[in-house]
Image (cartoon, coloured by chain):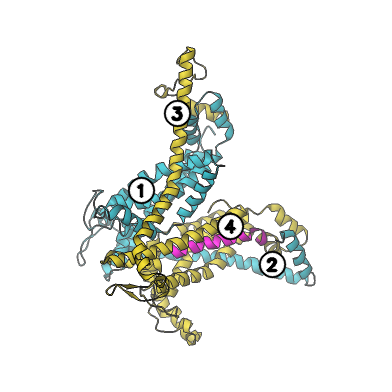
Amino acid sequence: METRRLASAVATANRPALSTGVVEPGERRGPTSAAGRRASIEGTVLADRVYRWAVLAFALCIPLLLLVIFVEVGRAGWPALRQFGFAFLTTSVWDPVAGEFGAAPAIVGTILTSLIALLIATPLALGGAIFLSDFSPSWLRQPLSFLIDLLAAVPSVVYGLWGVFVLLPLLRETVMPFLRDTLHLGATPFFSGPAYGPSLLAAGLILSIMVLPYVAAVSREVLLAVPRAQREAALALGATRWETITGAVLPYARSGIIGGVILGLGRALGETMAVTMVIGNRHELSASLFAPGYTMASLIANEFTEATSDIHLSALMAVGFVLLLITLSVNGIARWLVWRTGGRRA
Amino acid sequence: MTTPVAAEHRHRARVRGRGLARRRGTSVTMIALTCVAAAIAIVPLLLIFGYLLREGAGALSVDFFTNMPRPVGETGGGMANAIVGTLILVGIASTVGLPVGIGAGLYLAEHGGTRVANLVRFLADVLNGLPSIVMGIFAWQFLVRPFGHFSALAGGAAIGAMMIPLVTRTTEEMVRTVPGSLREAALALGYPRWRTSLQIVLRTALGGIVTGVLVAVARVAGETAPLLFTAFGNQFWSTNVTEPIAALPLQVFVYAISPYDEWHAQAWAGALVLIALVLLISVLARVAVRARHGRPND
């Protein structure tokens, strides 16, 4: 099979226009003198070297691109970071008119919404992944994986649209009053206040839907990478099917699954459009999840085109730089954990 | 670190006292719960597609594909410019992202063990997780600010850069699946390395690479955040790549946050077209895989 494939590949590749002077199988052509042959071999060596350097140059574009992003965004945000110093991260005044900027509400909002998202998405994604890797009937496995993967293919703005016209009314009219009044959670500061709809809770919910496929895909990948012998050994020792999962499979896959969850966290932290559309965009710290808020990404998306003063622009760039630093480190940790367990795709 | 087997021993010691029936009961309950989790996971997907079809299909008509956006109050507006704009942006993105991605993927597959390769591979994964809004402000700083105006080129380059890590990693994986004997046979026949790589190895892996490329295209076609401050959007017909250009996701965003019901309907229609485009590309990707595996001489 392979030889046939090779033969056809060679045949198609063997167009006369592409002669390099190499002696082709089954024919004699090209330079026949010793000197000519040496020249052609040197030509080949040169061409190989050029090819190698070319692909290396393409590969080096990736570190270069990251470096340029890092330097450019950092440089643009530097004036604001220098002027406000550490207070930029800890204060919550955001006044473009007075030129006072502190990004604390956006930073807190980002972390809070991402945590809500993970809190909801992780059990579902992990449960789904366990079902898919160990318990699903084989006819269901492929379509179900496909559907969950499909969630990752839905563009962010479509989630936002759905969030604005379906999720927000649902929250405003049903879920929020239910949480606050029926369950009496309104007594705690976290679920108090008027139910507008656009809120940290809405952003957390939409994010949970968006990160679920990422956590599920990595977990499934890692669970499938757990050797069969691991499961068989546990079953042979008399464990039930569930005890096999908790005793033999999950411990083996643990760091990979944690990696997948952190990868989801990276997604949630940087997600922009859907969050911008449902979070309400208000620069204020509030303990209540019903209150509108900001994330770093939505703050940039919302104000960037309206920024008129240099320092406002620089402050937004600085927010971008902080976001960049956070997501890069989160992703770095996640990849390292996933690689360590041997899950390759993510 | 405790080994899984040791953990299992402890576990067994702990549960020995419990009755088998109870352990079996727990097992069945938990398995049922994982099944429920999988079911809940796909509920949002069904809801979103349901609403898209219900709300979007009503607003969809021939006008939508052929007409320009119209002001509020006028009927028969469409998104012809945004659809063409998205295609142009994806074209620019592919021109930027594909050569770099495929080249880098070839490097990683063929010189995979080196330190440089490991670093590049790791950074490609890190780049893959870069927030799209950060790519947006970077592209603005790098490609819009110096020239003083928004442009399709800047937008295309921004989403093209987002394609690079995706294309790199699939190219690497696909090239790695090409049997080593194929490469060795070509080299033994006197083929230079570069021709072996480009004409034998890359050619054999092409089906898989096309799939990866299409997946990357599908992903960036729906990106909005990197376009906000680069392509910017345009209410008028424009195919000039140095000018601001309309894009489907941008138009959906603008219409969705507007206060007008007619525009909301247009947003749903736009979202439906966008998702249809993304799915169409994904299906093409699957067909490409099938064509590769089902080739007659395989």
Labels 2, 1: front one: 1
Of labels 2 and 1, earlier in sequence is 2
Question: Of the residues shown, which amino acid type is indicated by label 4?
Answer: Leu
Q: Which mark is residue A337?
A: 4
Residue at mark 3: chain: A
Of labels 3 and 4, earlier in sequence is 3
Indicate the quadrant where residue B251 lies.
Answer: bottom left
User: In the picture provided, is B6 more to the left or to the right than A56?
Assistant: right
Indicate the quadrant where residue A141 lies.
Answer: bottom right
The verdict on a common chain for dots 2 and 1 is yes
The verdict on a common chain for dots 4 and 1 is no
Q: Chain B is which colour?
A: cyan
Q: Is residue B70 visible?
A: yes
Q: Give the percent coordinates (x, y) of residue B231.
A: 29, 55
Which chain is painted in yellow?
A: A
Residue under the point 49% across and 29% down: A9
Q: Which residues are magenta?
A: A250-271
Q: Which mark is residue B27?
A: 2
Q: Which mark is residue B93?
A: 1
Q: Secondary structure at mark 2?
A: helix
Q: Which residue is mark 3?
A: A47
Label 3 – label 2 distance at C-alpha: 63 Å
